[in-house]
């Protein structure tokens, strides 16, 4: 199962995420749920860091990625992260029991 942990502030603004694991629908490299999640995550990370130039820390390892907004003056990072969370929720409905999404206050 893919685990997607999102972190929010007391003001309910998303601050980042950690996503890891494997959906388990097929072998690694052939799993459509994993491919969909990977694509959505890469899009969100690149939009935050390269398009909007938001200061963020990104760490990527095999089956594990972490993004933490360091500064989000305009709230654009929060909106992009919300879009990612919504996309992952849609994928989880299409492929039940493949993704667990959690939100924690920091």
Image: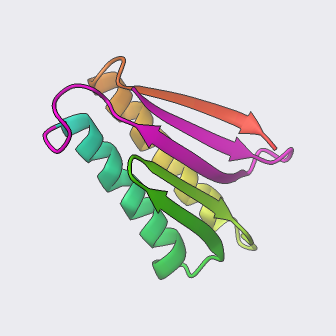
Q: Position of residue 41 (x, y in %)?
A: 41, 54
Is 27 in front, or is 69? 27
Q: Residue at x 86, y 44 (%)?
A: 10
In the image, the segment drawn in magenta is 1-30
Colour treatment of the image: rainbow
Rendered view: 87 above or below 101: below
Outermost left residue: 30
Name the residue rendered at 43%, 32% in the picture: 89
Write the residue at 58% across / 59% down: 67
Could you tell whether 36 is left or right of 30 in the image? right
Horizontal and vertical percent for residue 25?
21, 25
On screen, residue 91 above or below 42:
above
Of residues 13 and 96, the one nearer the viewer is: 96
Give 41 or 3, whichever is nearer the viewer.
Answer: 3
Above or below for 79 versus 30 = below
Q: Is residue 55 left or right of residue 73?
A: left
- The front one of 34 and 53 is 34
Q: Quadrant of the C terminus?
A: top right
What residue is drawn where x is 39% and y is 26%?
1
Farthest-out residue, front: 62
Is residue 29 part of the magenta span, yes or no?
Answer: yes
Q: Residue furthest right?
A: 10
Q: Residue furthest top?
A: 97
Task: Tell me how many marks there are.
Answer: 0
Residue 45 is situated, as x and y percent measured from the top left of the image, at: 47, 65
- In the rendered image, residue 34, in percent from the top left (x then y), is placed at 28, 40
- Does the magenta portion include 88? no
């Amino acid at each position: 199962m893919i685990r997607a942990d999102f972190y929010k502030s007391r003001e309910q603004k998303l601050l980042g995420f950690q996503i890891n694991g494997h959906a388990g629908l097929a072998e690694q490299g052939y799993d459509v749920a994993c491919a969909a999640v990977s694509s959505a995550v890469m899009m969100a990370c690149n939009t935050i860091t390269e398009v909007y130039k938001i200061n963020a820390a990104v760490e990527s390892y095999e089956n594990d990625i972490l993004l933490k907004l360091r500064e989000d003056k305009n709230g654009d990072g929060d909106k992009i992260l919300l879009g990612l969370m919504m996309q992952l929720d849609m994928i989880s409905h299409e492929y039940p029991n493949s993704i667990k999404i959690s939100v924690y206050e920091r």
